[in-house]
Image (spheres, coloured by chain):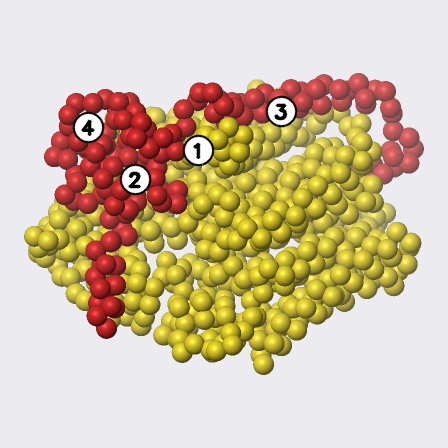
Amino acid sequence: MIAELGHFALVLSLGVALFQMIVPMIGASRDRAAWMDSARPAAMAQFGLLGIAFAALTVAFVTSDFSVALVYENSHSAKPMLYKVSGVWGNHEGSMLLWVLILALFGAAAAVFGDNLPPRLRARVLSVQAAIGAAFLAFILLTSNPFLRLDVPPFDGRDLNPLLQDPGLAFHPPFLYLGYVGLSMSFSFAVAALIEGRVDAAWARWVRPWTLAAWMFLTIGIALGSWWAYYELGWGGFWFWDPVENASFMPWLLAGALLHSAVVVEKRETLKAWTILLAIMAFGLSLVGTFIVRSGVITSVHSFASDPTRGVFILGILTLFVGGALTLFAARAGAMTTRAVFSPVSREGALLLNNLLLAVAAFVVFVGTLWPLVAEFATGRKLSVGPPFFEKAFTPFMIALALALPIGSILPWKRGRAGRAMAALRPAAFLALAVAGLVFAVSTGHSALAVVGAGLGAWLVAGSGVDLWQRAGGRAARLTRLPGADWGRAVAHAGLGVTFIGISLLMAWQVEDIRVAQVGDRLRIAGYDVTLQDVAEVQGPNYVSTTATMLVERAGRRVGVLHPEKRVYPVQAMPTTEAAISSGVFRDIYLVIGDRQQGGGWAIRSYVKPFAAWIWVGCGLMALGGLLSLTDRRYRVAATARRRASAPVPAE
Amino acid sequence: MRALAVVLLLALSAGPSFAVQPDEVLADAGLEARARDISRDLRCPVCQGENIDESNAPISRDLRLYVRERLVAGDSDAEVIEAVTDRFGEFVLFDPPATGSTLVLWLAGPVMALLGLLVAWRFVRQRPALARAEALNDEEQARLDRIMRDDAR
């Protein structure tokens, strides 16, 4: 009964979405206020109905209702409650339902917080948003209905893939989707602006917070996924340049570019057409990502469900929206040229360089991801494009970006002097060179990766410090009174630097040890003594675990006791490893237990991973920077500026 | 029940975490390091996008052992990679060689960057000319002043 209720709500929400797509759009072109305003209750109703549908599916999973086909295929009565709930989106159908739920959430948020939007623009934005919703709701109902029943309910379910039975599943997909789908708002604003034929500073001020929020969620989602891979897959890899990872990375790069170009539109009313194009492409790449994951055209560990009809359907949606938007763009972009003076050495010039580098970096990832497919179609060559390609082809653009970033962020608008910016950055440059020298001195083999990465990271962090200090006019007391956007910019840029340091030092300095150890054996790795004290069989809720007890010491002092595990989930007959990690500021100790050996003893893998935590701390700082920018009161001041445009305001 | 025991046994024998097994590791640390580097660039022919260093498939183990065998026999890195490619095709190369049509893949980034620079440069160059050609009218000037005031806050 509850599943039918959810099914019914899902169908009804498609009806509401179709209404919201058509009526406000016609109202906007015929100037009918009531028609335009109908978009707001419709957006909220659509969200409410999808909330009911999602709740109904969650109830089916929580109560283990195996008469629902999806629950039977992806759940088991013995599964812990956390995974019964997060298992709702641990499969194709459920994750698509989460996708449209979040899409409707953004639409409802624009309806609720959109008081200050011009009614016509708001109606068009919500209408475009509803069009995307309608397309995906049709996709779910026609190809991936989560509410289908089985005639004969089985006794128990087939369980969730053990790799997904991890707290990571509770957070990684929702954040990733908040980011992916959040970019639909930028897309809707871009298309609405094209229909209006008008892009100005006010438009950019409305678009920026939405893009910022989407970028922030995407940052958190990608970082969580990378951290999950790090601790779950058993060898501590954190990024694989896997097609699905790339699918989330491309929109992230373009959203980053869009954030910066929207600033130029806001401050200088130029780069308008390019900003619109970026907004279209950023969401377009989100759709490409969905297509790659759901169609399985490029094999990947992430495609837990792939089916050609689904792929074709999504390809159709992709063609319709991106093709339609680009056609509209081609017709209208000409009207958006501006006459502002644009000097290459200025903040806007630097932001243009940022956009160029981020867009080309995204293009490299795009070409690398799709190349095997293209090559096989065009020439019949079956080939692979993997991490070595991306490391070589992608990294130079990131190095250029990092080199230019601190200079660009302190250049003034309109016309700057490079020499003056460099003079202000002299302390940061000295610090960066000192760090690079130190790393060169202590690293064995003088790894170029470590030296360049750590030097650039220090340059970014120190450059952000200089940026803040300059904004405060060199007075510490004024630091706390700086606007949120200034703090956000500095924190996010410093976060990028911290991630640079983490990635380069981890990759250059990681130490590994593989051996067979008997209980009681002691091994030595990078100055740490690791003793295998015990190995025991432990029964978990829905798995059997082989748990080791390992003592880690350094120079006779106890660092900690770690418990790496190897689990077997009988229902899916699949083993997983649970690495044990002792995280520190300067290193992670990462222990893994493997198979029992024929001659006695256990296979043991130990790693010391320097600066590993810095990768995710840096991502956290980037997201925090986004959040700080979002709190900037100027977004809210801008929102009310229209109403009291002529009121005099004292200078700060 | 017996079936379950067999399944368990099979599952236990195929550990997921252990790509390189302790018995594969070469005694010579230099050769082992070279073997690891080579293995990271070779794709497991039957897995989904894993290299043979990380993969648990039996064929990956065979390939890892083969790579080490050749290194011990005195082959250079390039010779080992060529020997593996001869048997499995260029599909196993994660680092596609920049030859023939694959050249397009390698050049795509740099060419796009140059094109972008060119377009950006032209955009920047034509601005002053446009600015001189069309001065602001009164209405635009008023709007500009308003925006500038907003920005100054």
Chain containing mark 3: B
Please tell me which residue lies in front, B104 or A366: B104
Mark 3 is surrounded, within 10 Å at the Cα level, by few (under 14), some (14 to 19) or many (20 or more) other residues, namely: some
Instruction: Please state which amino acid type lies under the numbered disc 4.
Output: Arg
Does any portion of residue B18 appear in the rendered image? yes
Label 3 – label 4 distance at C-alpha: 46 Å
Residue highlighted by disc 4? B70
Residue type, numbered disc 2: Ile
Residue A44, quarter of the rendered image:
bottom right
Q: Nearest the camera: A511 or A479? A: A511
Percent of width and height locating residue A365: 51, 35
Question: Percent position (x, y) of residue A581?
Answer: 28, 53
Label 3 sits on what residue type?
Answer: Gly
Q: CA distance from mark 1 to mark 4?
A: 25 Å
The secondary structure type at the circle numbered 4 is helix
Output the letter for the chain in red. B
Q: Are dots 1 and 2 on a single chain?
A: no
Q: Which residue is mark 2?
A: B52
The residue identified by callout 1 is A382
Q: Residue at x 22, y 32 (%)?
A: B67
Q: Which mark is residue B116?
A: 3
Q: Are marks 3 and 4 on the same chain?
A: yes
